[in-house]
Image: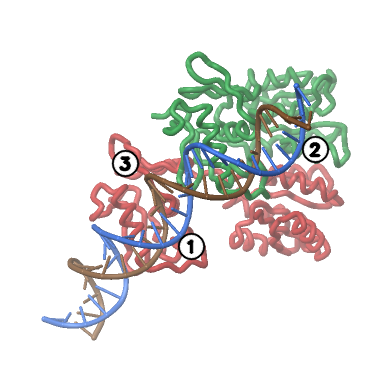
Chain colours: A red, B green, C brown, D blue
Amino acid sequence: MTRVLVVDDEVSIRKALSLNLAARGYEVVLADSGEAAMRAVAAEHPDIVLLDLGLPGIDGIGTLEALRGWTQVPVIVVTVRDDEASKIAALDAGADDYITKPFSMGELLARLRAALRRAPDAAPESPEVVADHFRLDLPAHRAFVGDAGAEVRLTPTEWSIVAYLARNPGRLVTHRQLVTAVWGPTYDPDPNLLRVHMAHIRRKLEADPSRPRHFVTDSGVGYRFEPSPG
Amino acid sequence: MTRVLVVDDEVSIRKALSLNLAARGYEVVLADSGEAAMRAVAAEHPDIVLLDLGLPGIDGIGTLEALRGWTQVPVIVVTVRDDEASKIAALDAGADDYITKPFSMGELLARLRAALRRAPDAAPESPEVVADHFRLDLPAHRAFVGDAGAEVRLTPTEWSIVAYLARNPGRLVTHRQLVTAVWGPTYDPDPNLLRVHMAHIRRKLEADPSRPRHFVTDSGVGYRFEPSPG
DNA sequence: AAGCGCCTTCACGGGTTCTTCACGCCCGAC
DNA sequence: GTCGGGCGTGAAGAACCCGTGAAGGCGCTT
């Protein structure tokens, strides 16, 4: 289900958009200020944002600039301002599209579809992760070990764990974080489960599985990925 | 240097856009018909296309649809048609943006920058994909196998799957992504459906269908297209 | 009206993957 | 020294996924 964040301070607009989008099968999240929008993007991970320019507090452009500091989520600016300067400012601040009120719902939906179409998944940060003893090709979901670069096959769950750890290099990842990343927030597995998967991963990727150098245990807390152990 | 293809049948518009874009440091390529536009995209590899809707011969929408059969180059529709239906038709046919004449040069340039910004320098797209055992002619929707180059007929659905995978060479494509690309985001088919189509595709394109080298399964996740397996 | 191509669903067999369980180890707490 | 919790490892059954042959239904052409 596609999740849309609607940012507008007017109740009537929020309501109208919310109803129309929900009727088209979108999941709608609402925010009534720039600050709320920032929080909502961080917490709800919308697939796209509809942003009004005239907001209380930090305005639309400010919100857009702040968002662009850390996320590439598509943003369509929806506003009454029809002047060229506003359009240019918004587009150059990182907006993906600009549509002026009053707009037709059909056109908005079409522009929504167009923006979503060209962003199937967030662009991969770094397509490749290199460690001392192995190499990960993130877009292809492939792993290679040793100097020869022989491919090893990781199961979906194993890949999910490895990819999450690799995306947070050097950082401690708690058991809870890992479980949530792999199985979702509601899953509560046997404590052994992660251990078993980690054992499999180490056997496949570590040079000496019983003495792991890249996938390190933090006893009682979680695991940590070290690209190049000192 | 960014290369812009301007497609319009009116000399005055071509001239005006050409001058303005050149003054901003863009390299401009011109085409005066849909057919010429297709050739220009294939030959010149523009970074972005400005497309008029009212063209002689195959019209703008037809040109757009034909282009989308094999390339993802960003297309901004520039036209006098201001009705909602045209906008929706163009955006759903694969346009990235839609701007109506008369437009301000500033806004056009801003939308141009916005469209270019979100298009990561895509791998140089070629209208032809060559693998070890077969060859795909993307614009013509034709496939040829073996050294002799005998043509095989793919059904529309099969072609749709093959084309999507071929446009993402080496990348893992999830089941969901494939289904969305072929049948749309709301379709939720029997899990066997993709398997059956993949079997048909392999039987037609792979040298040894039971041991696929180009259309690889990633169990539990999706499929991957390998142009030249190591 | 019949034939054909295409899409989709279903049933089956074989293989892979997930998860649980039991056991022994290590290390800090007492 | 002893205890207990957390950890790694091997094994095993259950659940899942995949490829494949076959068949029904639909729309279009003949």
Q: Quick one: SS at disc 3?
A: strand
Q: How many C-alpha atoms fall within 10 Å of the one at disc 2: few (<14), some, or many (≥20)?
A: some
Circles 2 and 3 on the same chain: no
Please determine whether, in this image, residue B198 is positioned above or below residue A159: above
Quadrant in the picture for residue C23: bottom left
Question: Circle 3 sits on which residue?
Answer: A145
Left or right, residue A35 beside residue B201? right
Q: How many C-alpha atoms fall within 10 Å of the one at disc 1: few (<14), some, or many (≥20)?
A: some
Residue B89 tag number:
2
Q: Quick one: SS at disc 2?
A: helix
Q: In front: A134, or C11?
A: C11
State the separation of the CA atoms marked 2 and 3. 49 Å
What is the three-letter code of the residue carrying label 2? Ala
Please say if the residues under marks 2 and 3 sit with CB atoms less than 8 Å apart.
Answer: no
Q: Quick one: SS at disc 1?
A: helix
Image quadrant holding the N terminus of chain A, namely bottom right
Circles 3 and 1 on the same chain: yes
The picture places residue A19, in percent across and down from the top left corner, at 79, 61
Label 3: chain? A
Q: Would residue B199 be seen by someone viewing this image from the given angle? A: yes
Q: In front: C12, or B39?
A: C12
State the residue at coordinates (37%, 44%): A153
Quadrant in the picture for residue A172: bottom left
State the residue at coordinates (85%, 26%): B54
Residue A180 tag number:
1
What is the three-letter code of the residue carrying label 3? Val
The picture places residue B144, in percent across and down from the top left corner, at 55, 20
